[in-house]
Image: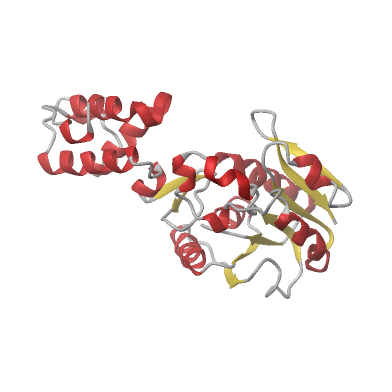
Amino acid sequence: MSAGRMGAATVRESLFAAREALFPIANEEAAFSARLLLCHALGVSDLLPLYASPMPEAAQTVLSAYVARRLSGEPLQYILGEWEFMGLPFYVERGVLIPRQDTETLAEHAVSLIAAHGYKTALDLCCGTGCIGISLHKLAGIAVTLADIDDTCLALARKNAARNAVSAQVLQSDLFGAISERFDLIACNPPYIPTGELSSLQKEVQAEPQIALDGGADGLKFYRRIAAAYKSRLNAGGALLLEVGISQADDVKKLFENAYTVKDLNGVERVVAVTG
């Protein structure tokens, strides 16, 4: 059923029609995506009490537009305008990398290090939405600085800090270029996709900003830059945590001394941790 022919008598029927329409692009996540989009169109968090209710025409029009956008390859998160990370709400928008569950592996390990070592300060480098640093403050009480080169990211990071009642220093910086302080913990999810692979990414990933994806010819460009500069910004006994792409962990580890890896829930080496 096409996005333009989803007219349905009830909310439940509209949900099923949206699921059917989304299946070609969302596959096994079609039902989940349809439910989120319908909730957003109706302005509710729970559809169950409304299943037998007539689907409002205005909400149906909005839902049809959402489905059409998703079928065009626009990420679900951009359509919704928000996404959850570490159980916290974050605004998302075009021009800023979408928070992903992969990155929660880094945040979870950071929380454990903060608890174990009593770290007091953290830098979220290449912060994007600010999801890592803001989560660390909320969940572990650490003082955070959010840094990114991009104005759109910085503006959104400020909005997300305010949304989560976090007081954070926000700085514009090309990696460590404008950073003068030292930190107990530095966390970074840098661009790490090899330039030659960008054109083969899923359509929705290609909709995200290239500046947040392009890691240079071999995907390691930013790790090399970080390796050359991080020591002057990390306190003794501190830790540097880096998200890495699949099969990149060994190559990234070779750039650092005292490095180890952390696996995600799927057994992928997702984080390279460096002790100071």
For residue 68, what is the image quadrant? top left
Q: Is residue 78 visible?
A: yes
Quadrant where the C terminus is found in the figure: bottom right
Question: Outermost residue, right direction?
Answer: 257
208 or 56, which is in the foreground? 208
The residue shown at (46%, 63%) is 156
Q: Is residue 42 visible?
A: no
Colouring convention used in this rendered image of the protein: secondary structure
For residue 260, what is the image quadrant? top right
129 or 86, which is in the foreground? 129
x, y percent for residue 148: 59, 65
- In the figure, 235 relative to 83: above or below? below
x, y percent for residue 250: 80, 40
- In the figure, 207 relative to 68: above or below? below
The residue shown at (53%, 55%) is 210
Quadrant where the N terminus is found in the figure: top left
The residue shown at (69%, 32%) is 268
The residue shown at (16%, 42%) is 61
x, y percent for residue 196: 62, 46
159 or 113, which is in the foreground? 159
Does 53 sit left or right of 239 as displayed? left
Does 223 sit left or right of 18 as displayed? right
How many marks do you count on the picture? 0
